[in-house]
Image (cartoon, grey):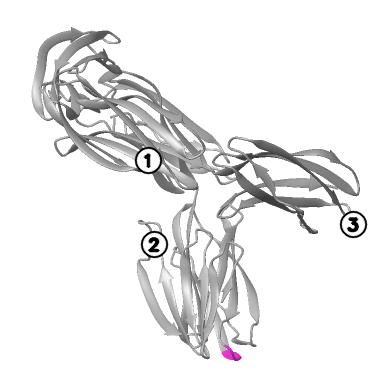
Amino acid sequence: MSYDNLDRLTNVTINGFSWIYNYDALGRILKVIRNNTETSLLKYSGSPLHAPSKLITTQTGVDVYRENTYNTSNKTKIVQFYLINEKNTSITNVNWTGEFGDGNLINSNIPFNLSLKENVFVIVEHNYSKGGNYRINLTGRTDSSSSDYETLNLIFGAIANSLSVLKQNASTIVSEFNAKNNINELSVNWSWNCTNGVYSNISFNMSANEDLLIVMENNYSLSNPNLTCSVYSADGSQNKSAIIAFDGIKIEKYNSTLTDTDTALVKFDIKNYFSTLDVNWNITVNGLLYAISSGITLNQGQSTTINQEINFTNAGLKQIKITIGSGNFTDAYSENIRLYSLGIRQYFDYIKNGTARIFNFLIKNDWTNLTAYWNASNPALTNAVNLSQNESLIVIIEEAYSQGNKESVIKVFNSTVQEDRLLDVFKIRQISIESLQTLHENTSRSVVYSIVKNNINPLNISWRLNNTQELINSNQNVNLNTSEQMIVIIESNFSSSGIYPLNFVINSSSYNDNATGVAVS
């Protein structure tokens, strides 16, 4: 398999069968060549951009490749392209045809041959009588049968460059339309019109490469806001369209605050960006209408602030939705909030010794009387308790752990609904490396030190340092009492300068710990 610089598959060979893939600048597959005998051509004509509009399967022969047009300043256009031999043998009687969209075509008058992997560069000049929108078709043939074709869209003469909104005030809009004669000679019989009713009432001429700028101010209908402007001439026509959106009423500065376990205060602004409007608003909670108001009159640019207190009868996930409206204008905003009936409060993790932990926390009921269910994962515990409103349960758990990385998950439920969850991650080390530091370094040696601690009963501890170049081991075990520490100082000698990774390990029967570092020599 072979790939190009963009990691696109270009060649595949499996058990004597081969496939060749060609792409365009957009990454679209243009063709697939199988065994240099059959070609599948994918043609793209428009929208959707990456979906082929046509699939053509033909015998492999000549390929029309890298087609392009030049000289956009006058009516004489230059088209260039390559003809490539895609077969694994020579091909004979190759010819080409160029159709230029104005009823004229040019044929190659002398057939030629293409050797294996050979290509021919073709340059064609064509004189158009006038500007316009043309579709150029380039076809390559072998033995009088069509092998490949490519198309080019060419537009010159009257060009609609842009249509944009300069300023908008309610339904009054100032727009700008730009057009140009992009050929370097006089173009005659120009006119223009727009769907807002503005148009030129006399024809005019445009000098070479002259620009046309039209600025319009209009009142637009809310039911038909789109705008299209067209330019016409003896050298073709083109148009541009713009979708005009009216800013009406908007919900702004939304905020919600829990003022109690069962109460939320919702605050938002309604602002009118259009002419004077009567605005209605409502609030729904989980789809049920909670509050409604109508008849708020707002002038253009005016806003009003709404404050609404919402009381809930039960806990859980709640959706608060604000909707405002005035005629054709609407706006909406929604927020999901969660009200908790139970929660884990004041969680503390106490280190009793090297292996034992004491967990202390409260389970508090912020709602009405209920039965709270809770469980812990490590150690595995579960329990249930009846709690009155604002009542708390104190939970104390003590557990001795084996060595390793640990995590404990505590969950609290109201019936089957999980109300709160807490994750505690910690490390248990019966023996531990408290630190590993470098004391000294030069071009040939380094000195490191480590603080080693015993967290349980008295133990005999050994150590080993792997400095990448050699293993350095302790020559005797050291007995450490509970919570006792020792300092280990190790000198390493290096044969050459460099950066050496360090791995320091301590052992005592089934317990161990390790730390890593680096030495620079």
Q: Amino acid at mark 2?
A: Ser
Q: Amino acid at mark 3?
A: Ser
Q: Which residues are magenta?
A: 88-92
The residue under label 2 is 45
- Mark-to-mark CA distance, 3 and 2: 69 Å
The disc at residue 495 is 3
- Mark-to-mark CA distance, 2 and 1: 60 Å
Kindly identify the residue that appears in the image at 34 percent across and 22 percent down.
173
One can see residue 429 in this view: yes
Q: Amino acid at mark 1?
A: Ser
Q: Determine crowd level at label 2: few under 14, some 14-19, many 20+ residues with C-alpha closer than 10 A.
A: few
The residue under label 1 is 408
Q: Is residue 201 above or below residue 9?
A: above
Say whether residue 177 is left or right of residue 79. Answer: left
Earlier in the chain: of badge 2 and badge 1, it is 2
Question: Is 89 contained in the magenta span?
Answer: yes
Q: Where's the N terminus, which quadrant?
A: bottom right
Which quadrant of the view contains residue 487?
Answer: top right
